[in-house]
Image: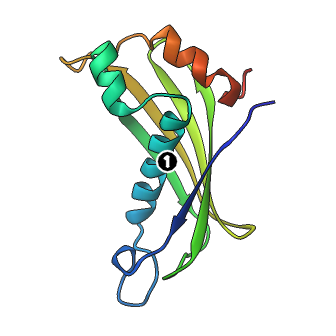
C-alpha cells in the first residue's frame, strides 16, 4: 500500500471566470503546486534537483478529467501518489476534492531531463525518497 501526498488550495477570485467557476486551466496550476509541495515533503525541490543533479522534471503528458466544478472560495484538497516509475520517468495520479466530492482526476507523466533536453535516469536518492508514495512499494 502506498501513502498519499495531500495539499490544500483555496480558490481565489483570480482562479475563476466571471461566473465564479474555476477556469479549467487553473486546475493544472493547482496540480502543479501539489506536485511541488510533494517534492518539498521528501526533502527536494525543483531547484535542488537542478543544482544537485543538473536535471529538470518536465511534464510529458497530462490526462485530466473534470468531474464537477469548483467555485470561488472553495477549499480544495489535492491527493497525489506515484502510480509507476521507469528509469527516466514516473506517472503521478492526482485527484482534487471539495470536501468528499471528487472534482478532478489527472494522470501526469513526468520525465527527468538534462540540460540538452535528453531523458536521463532518475537519481537513486530521489527515487528512494519517493518509494513510500509509489503504488509498487
Left or right, residue 77 beside residue 17: right
Q: Is residue 86 visible?
A: no
Residue under numbered circle 1: 63
Left or right, residue 5 beside residue 15: right
Q: Is residue 99 above or below residue 96?
A: below
Q: Position of residue 65 (x, y in %)?
A: 55, 58
Residue farthest to the right, as pictured:
1
Dot 1 falls on a residue whose secondary structure is strand
Q: Position of residue 72 (x, y in %)?
A: 48, 82
Q: Residue at x 50, y 28 (%)?
A: 43
Q: Give the total number of marks visible in the rendering.
A: 1
Residue farthest to the bottom, as pictured:
19
Q: Residue at x 75, y 67 (%)?
A: 100
Q: Residue at x 33, y 14 (%)?
A: 53
**Observer-nearest residue: 132 or 21?**
132
Left or right, residue 86 beside residue 6: left
Q: Is residue 91 visible?
A: yes
Q: Position of residue 1 (x, y in %)?
A: 81, 30
The quarter of the image holding the C terminus is: top right
Q: Is residue 49 above or below residue 75?
A: above
Q: Is residue 95 above or below residue 55?
A: below
Q: Residue at x 48, y 74 (%)?
A: 11
Left or right, residue 63 beside residue 5: left
Q: Position of residue 24 (x, y in %)?
A: 42, 68
Give the image's coloring scheme.
rainbow
**Observer-nearest residue: 25 or 42?**
42
Q: Quadrant of residue 18?
A: bottom left
Residue farthest to the front, as pictured:
43
Residue farthest to the left, as pictured:
116
Disc 1 residue crowd, few under 14, some 14–19, many 20+, Cα 10 Å? few
Amino acid at each position: 500500500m502506498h501513502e498519499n501526498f495531500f495539499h490544500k488550495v483555496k480558490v481565489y477570485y483570480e482562479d475563476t471566470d466571471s461566473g465564479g467557476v474555476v477556469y479549467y486551466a487553473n486546475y493544472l496550476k493547482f496540480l502543479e503546486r501539489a506536485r511541488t509541495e510533494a517534492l518539498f515533503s521528501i526533502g527536494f525541490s525543483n531547484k535542488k534537483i537542478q543544482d544537485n543533479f543538473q536535471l529538470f522534471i518536465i511534464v510529458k503528458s497530462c490526462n485530466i478529467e473534470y468531474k464537477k466544478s469548483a467555485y470561488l472560495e472553495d477549499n480544495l484538497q489535492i491527493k497525489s501518489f506515484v502510480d509507476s516509475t521507469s528509469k527516466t520517468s514516473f506517472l503521478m495520479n492526482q485527484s482534487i476534492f471539495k470536501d468528499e466530492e471528487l472534482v478532478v482526476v489527472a494522470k501526469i507523466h513526468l520525465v527527468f531531463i538534462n540540460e540538452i533536453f535528453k531523458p536521463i535516469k532518475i537519481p537513486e536518492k530521489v527515487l528512494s525518497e519517493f518509494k513510500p508514495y509509489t503504488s509498487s512499494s
